[in-house]
Image (cartoon, helix red, strand yellow):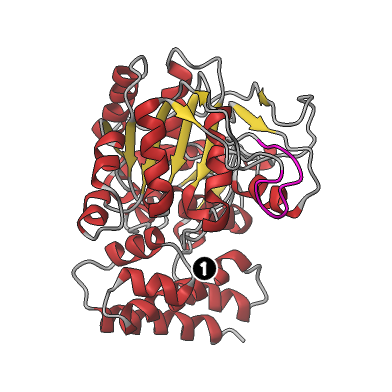
């Protein structure tokens, strides 16, 4: 499955700091993009953080353009999926801030896009930014914009994500990762409806709806003095919790079937999960949620024959990958990278005895990512969890 393929549920943001297997970036619907016409390195970094395409067909630099790709539906007949659709319908026409919470890979951005598409601001921009992927030195410029000459490398004036969201929606993913220094300015913008570019003198009135997402418990971050309490109450007016895939087993199969039916390679459209293969999927905890499911199905389709995906084609045990290497079969490099990443992060959690902040500093990963990994081993001590990660690595290396 490639980067622009229908994925059945999740349209993850283009910069994903999660450890979950898969790592595919799917853009089933992008209400707007932003085009930057600068060759300056600082602006290229801003573009990367903002999920920006440069010099697209939209015309003048700094203007948002709309795309007509259909919005991927939220698939599932479970009560949990029905509740999400109900809340989207209830909240869509309101302008209050919405906080979407859930583990990495559950489809929080897709929920945000449904809120945008169903609301009165649907004809205006959906300006998305991943706060966990923005370098702190660039965060203010990316959010608020900057004037020419505001800092070294600011060779031209740039609009920020907030002004580009005017009359539309500002989506802040991983809002818990926003630097405290930026949180203060963001709170002021939300309270006053006015933004001033870095190095600028003229404040600009803005009107946008804020939708935020988090995979870390914001209340806990407030208690740890890592997230402002006043901003927390500004952000968390309305809330939607997206449950993990393991809590929606029936939805899991529906989503899987939709992924197969929507595969870019038409040869796979008629492929079906056998009942035992479906049971095998239901038995897995899916710490990587939708992204992990997509990865597993991509591998299963390669191995399947005669249009049937059998239980042996569903491979999420790293030892299976090791056996595949021995037999000269195709091995997914992204899966290997994610196993190594998980091992390093688990070692950091074990070394710090679960101190997420210290583990994030050791590994260079976001606190949200470490929170998700820590939550996935609840009920298990760190020594045992680290030993299991060691065993996974040994199984992987046995294929060499």
Helix, strand or loop for disc 1:
helix
Query: In the figure, residue 147 lies in which quadrant?
Result: top right
The residue closer to the viewer here, 19 or 49, is 49
Q: Give left or right: position of 252 versus 56.
A: left
The residue sitting at the front extreme is 201
Which segment is the magenta one? 149-158
Query: In the figure, residue 111 lies in which quadrant?
Result: top left
Does residue 373 sit above or below 265 in this rendering?
below
Residue 16 image position (x, y, % from top left):
52, 54
| Residue for badge 1 | 338
Q: Residue at x 38, y 62 (%)?
A: 367
Does residue 285 sit above or below 120 in this rendering?
below
Residue 179 image position (x, y, % from top left):
42, 54
Q: Residues within 10 Å of mark 1 (few under 14, many from 20)?
A: some
Q: Residue at x 26, y 80 (%)?
A: 353
Residue 199 image position (x, y, % from top left):
60, 42
The residue closer to the viewer here, 319 or 310, is 319
């Amino acid at each position: 499955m490639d980067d622009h393929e229908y994925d059945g549920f999740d349209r993850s943001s283009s910069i994903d700091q999660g450890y979950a297997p898969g790592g595919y970036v799917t853009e089933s619907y992008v209400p707007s993009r932003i085009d930057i016409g600068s060759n300056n390195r600082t602006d290229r970094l801003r573009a990367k953080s903002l999920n920006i395409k440069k010099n697209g067909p939209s015309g003048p630099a700094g203007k948002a353009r709309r795309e007509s790709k259909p919005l991927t539906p939220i698939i599932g007949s479970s009560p949990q999926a029905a509740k999400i659709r109900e809340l989207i319908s209830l909240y869509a026409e309101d302008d209050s801030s919405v906080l979407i919470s859930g583990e990495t890979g559950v489809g929080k951005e897709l929920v945000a896009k449904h809120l945008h598409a169903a609301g009165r601001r649907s004809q205006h921009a959906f300006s998305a930014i991943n706060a966990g992927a923005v370098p702190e030195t660039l965060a203010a410029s990316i959010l608020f914009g900057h004037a020419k000459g505001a800092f070294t490398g600011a060779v031209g004036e740039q609009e920020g994500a907030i002004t580009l969201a005017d009359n539309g929606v500002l989506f802040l993913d991983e809002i818990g990762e926003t630097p405290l220094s930026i949180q203060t300015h963001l709170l002021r913008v939300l309270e006053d409806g006015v933004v001033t570019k870095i190095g600028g003198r003229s404040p600009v009135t803005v009107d946008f709806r804020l939708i935020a997402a988090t995979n870390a418990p914001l209340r806990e971050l407030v208690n740890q003095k890592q997230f402002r309490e006043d901003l927390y109450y500004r952000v968390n007016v309305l809330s939607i919790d997206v449950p993990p895939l393991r809590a929606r087993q029936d939805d899991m199969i529906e989503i899987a079937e939709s992924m197969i039916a929507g595969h870019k390679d038409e040869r796979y459209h008629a492929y079906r999960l056998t009942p035992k293969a479906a049971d095998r999927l239901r038995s897995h905890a899916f710490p990587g949620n939708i992204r992990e499911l997509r990865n597993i199905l991509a591998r299963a389709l390669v191995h399947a024959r005669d249009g049937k995906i059998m239980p042996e084609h569903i491979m999420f045990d790293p030892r299976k990958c090791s056996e595949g290497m021995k037999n000269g079969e195709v091995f997914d490099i992204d899966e290997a990278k994610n196993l190594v990443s998980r091992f390093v992060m688990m070692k950091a959690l074990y070394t710090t005895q679960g101190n997420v902040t210290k583990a994030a500093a050791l590994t260079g990963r976001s606190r949200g990512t470490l929170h998700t990994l820590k939550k996935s081993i609840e009920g298990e001590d760190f020594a045992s969890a680290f030993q299991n990660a060691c065993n996974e690595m040994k199984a992987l290396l046995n294929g060499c």
